[in-house]
Image: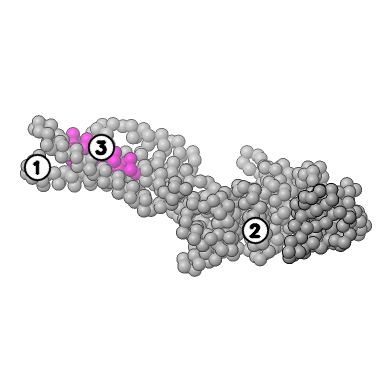
């Protein structure tokens, strides 16, 4: 095992770096798209059901099918990593829109009305009151989306782009266990680290949540 | 002064919440909006800071129509307190209180210093400053709510059932402190409550709302109790309104008899400093009976009457500030006094009082 890692260190490192990029860039895109969509679903009440339904349907498309179909729809090359990024961004949006909308809806109306009655204007209220209070629920959604992305990237190896997934296909082709084990360990490790980072960020930015739970 | 001019509010769907309301809330006074739920009192309150826009009519603050003013600016000049306080869970207590100063651009340091000052003013220990709302009791949260409304020193305060979510003991405390605060600050206050006792205790003026958003009566608490406009108001202020209206008459005018007039065998035990301790009477044997209560010249007729009725010897004991006995009066004598002062008063004002009020 150690020998395998020593001989293929560069290859593993490249795969790992590629895996991180393929998993996390879609998360960023997803957040940027999901925030306004989720907000819209709350502000315009009649939009909530359609938006949640459509994103739910998007999430139910099998990932492999999406990887294969996307080049046809958006005109990318079959082997382009863009396919993975766009596909995973769609999944992230699908997951996060609902989180954002539900998080904003969960903010106590007496609190938001009090804010308005104190003289908050809409935009300032959104960033000063609604979003900060909704943050814990939104971050819970973000954890799911991030971990799910990290595991989904591997599927991309079947169409030739897949970060650590390429170690799986290689191991299968060569009937050789080491790359598969390294791939699994690194993938799980990456998911655990990203998840912990989000939890830490949540503790740092929302100290009031834990305080409230204790009393 | 806040003026309602023919204000109506019909909600989409056709419910009339407020119908053709004309009302004047005097500057520096507490005006209570009271009535059963769904009578339009909260809607009326929320039209003052434009959280709800009237369907017709207009509202003026100090003669200026509010409809043309910037809503956010207007609201920053009106303190707002609601049931359950509506505090920001993600902000510390100081930062909650400093909300409006932060909004109008007061420096952080100055706004927080002012917030800490206000904490003391509303009876909150300073060590709560860095806590979060979830760590405070309901009563403490409500105090924070009041402090937050006062932070920018607004001339107007809007209060929507601010004390109804706390237990009765805390509520009584908050009400007392609120009155003390108001006597210092002299804000123009609109106060919504469904509790007629609270309205009578706190209001300088009381507007009784009835279903459909009409005002059944607008007057001082005393007017409501002594001269209810109709059956609805009579019912709403309750059966013991005669007794409660005694709260407006001072005890100092009572013809209290000196202690020497006590009947034989009845006396008041006193301690070494001469403070009243207990009743003793030949009828009790060797044991004394607790005083059950005393009243002072600064109390009201209601308290004096209550003491007289519950006294084991049928006499209310008046004491001075130090608790030493001053004199006694029986409930029959209080009733006589009441009858004579009321008949004199009704001769003055042209007999506004119905006969049953006099006989209380």
Q: Position of residue A27 (x, y in %)?
A: 30, 45
Circles 1 and 3, Cβ within 8 Å, touching? The answer is no
**Of the pair A126 and B271, the residue shown nearer to us:** B271
Give the answer, above or below, for where A5 lies relative to B256: above
Query: Can residue A135 be spotted in the picture?
Result: yes
Q: Position of residue B114 (x, y in %)?
A: 53, 66
Q: Position of residue A2 (x, y in %)?
A: 9, 42
Disc 2 on helix, strand or loop?
helix
User: Residue lying farthest front?
Assistant: B286
- Decide which of tag 1 and tag 3 comes sooner along the chain: 1
Disc 3 on helix, strand or loop?
helix
Q: Which residue is mark 1?
A: A2
Task: Please identify the quarter of the rendering in which residue B11 is found.
Answer: top right
Quarter of the image that includes the N terminus of chain B: bottom right
In the displayed structure image, the side of residue B176 where residue A10 appears, left or right:
left
Instruction: Tell which subunit mark 1 falls on.
Output: A
Q: Answer whether residue B86 is magenta in the image.
A: no
Query: How dense is the environment of label 3, judged by Cα within 10 Å: few (below 14), some, or many (20 and up)?
Result: many
Q: Which residue is mark 2?
A: B178
Disc 1 on helix, strand or loop?
helix
Instruction: Tell which subunit mark 2 falls on.
Output: B
Residue sitting at x 81%, y 42%: B231
**Of the pair B269 and B255, the residue shown nearer to us:** B269
Residue sitting at x 37%, y 34%: A56
């Amino acid at each position: 095992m150690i020998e395998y890692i020593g001989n293929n260190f560069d290859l593993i490192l490249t795969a790992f770096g590629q895996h991180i990029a393929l998993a996390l860039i879609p998360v960023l895109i997803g957040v940027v798209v999901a925030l306004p969509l989720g907000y819209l679903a709350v502000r315009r009440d009649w939009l909530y059901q359609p938006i949640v339904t459509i994103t739910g349907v998007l999430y139910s498309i099998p990932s492999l099918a999406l990887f294969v179909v996307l080049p046809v729809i958006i005109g990318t090359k079959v082997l382009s990593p863009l396919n993975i990024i766009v596909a995973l961004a769609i999944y992230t949006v699908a997951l996060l829109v609902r989180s954002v909308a539900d998080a904003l809806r969960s903010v106590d109306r007496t609190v938001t009305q009090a804010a308005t009655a104190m003289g908050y204007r809409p935009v300032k209220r959104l960033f000063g009151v609604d979003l900060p209070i909704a943050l814990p629920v939104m971050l819970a959604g973000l954890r799911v989306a991030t971990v799910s992305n990290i595991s989904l990237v591997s599927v991309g190896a079947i169409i030739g782009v897949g970060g650590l997934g390429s170690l799986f296909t290689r191991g299968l082709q060569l009937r050789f266990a080491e790359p598969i084990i390294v791939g699994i360990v690194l993938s799980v490790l990456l998911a655990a680290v990203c998840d912990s980072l989000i939890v830490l960020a949540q503790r740092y930015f929302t100290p009031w949540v834990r305080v409230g739970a204790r009393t | 002064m806040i003026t309602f001019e023919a204000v109506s509010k019909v909600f989409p769907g056709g419910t009339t919440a407020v119908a053709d309301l004309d009302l004047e809330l005097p500057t520096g006074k507490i005006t209570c909006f009271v009535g059963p739920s769904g009578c339009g009192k909260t809607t009326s309150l929320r039209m003052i800071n434009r959280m709800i826009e009237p369907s017709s009519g207009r509202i003026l603050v100090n003669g200026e129509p509010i409809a043309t003013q910037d809503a956010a600016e207007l609201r920053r000049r009106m303190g707002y307190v609601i049931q359950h306080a509506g505090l920001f869970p993600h902000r510390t207590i100081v930062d909650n209180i400093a909300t409006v100063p932060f909004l109008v651009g007061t420096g952080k340091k100055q706004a927080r210093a002012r917030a800490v000052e206000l904490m003391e003013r509303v009876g909150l220990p300073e060590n709560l400053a860095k806590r979060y709302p979830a760590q405070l009791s309901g009563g403490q949260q409500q105090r924070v709510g009041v402090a937050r409304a006062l932070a920018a020193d607004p001339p107007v305060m809007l209060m929507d059932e601010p004390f109804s979510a706390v237990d009765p003991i805390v509520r009584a405390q908050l009400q007392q402190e609120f009155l003390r605060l108001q006597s210092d600050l002299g804000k123009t206050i609109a106060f919504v409550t469904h509790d007629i006792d609270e309205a009578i205790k706190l209001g300088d003026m009381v507007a009784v709302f009835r279903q459909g958003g009409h005002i059944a009566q607008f007057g001082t608490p005393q007017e409501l109790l002594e001269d209810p406009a109709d059956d609805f108001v009579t019912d709403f202020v309750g059966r013991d309104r005669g007794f409660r209206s005694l709260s407006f008459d001072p005890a100092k005018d009572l013809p209290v008899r000196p202690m020497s007039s006590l009947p034989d065998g009845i006396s008041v035990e006193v301690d070494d400093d001469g403070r009243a301790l207990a009743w003793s009477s030949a009828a009790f044997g060797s044991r004394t009976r607790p005083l059950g209560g005393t009243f002072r010249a600064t109390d009201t007729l209601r308290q004096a009457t209550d003491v007289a009725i519950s006294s084991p010897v049928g006499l209310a004991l008046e004491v001075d500030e130090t608790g030493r006995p001053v004199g006694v009066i029986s409930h029959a004598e209080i009733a006589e006094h009441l009858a004579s002062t009321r008949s004199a008063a009704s001769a003055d004002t042209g007999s506004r009082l119905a006969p049953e009020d006099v006989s209380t």
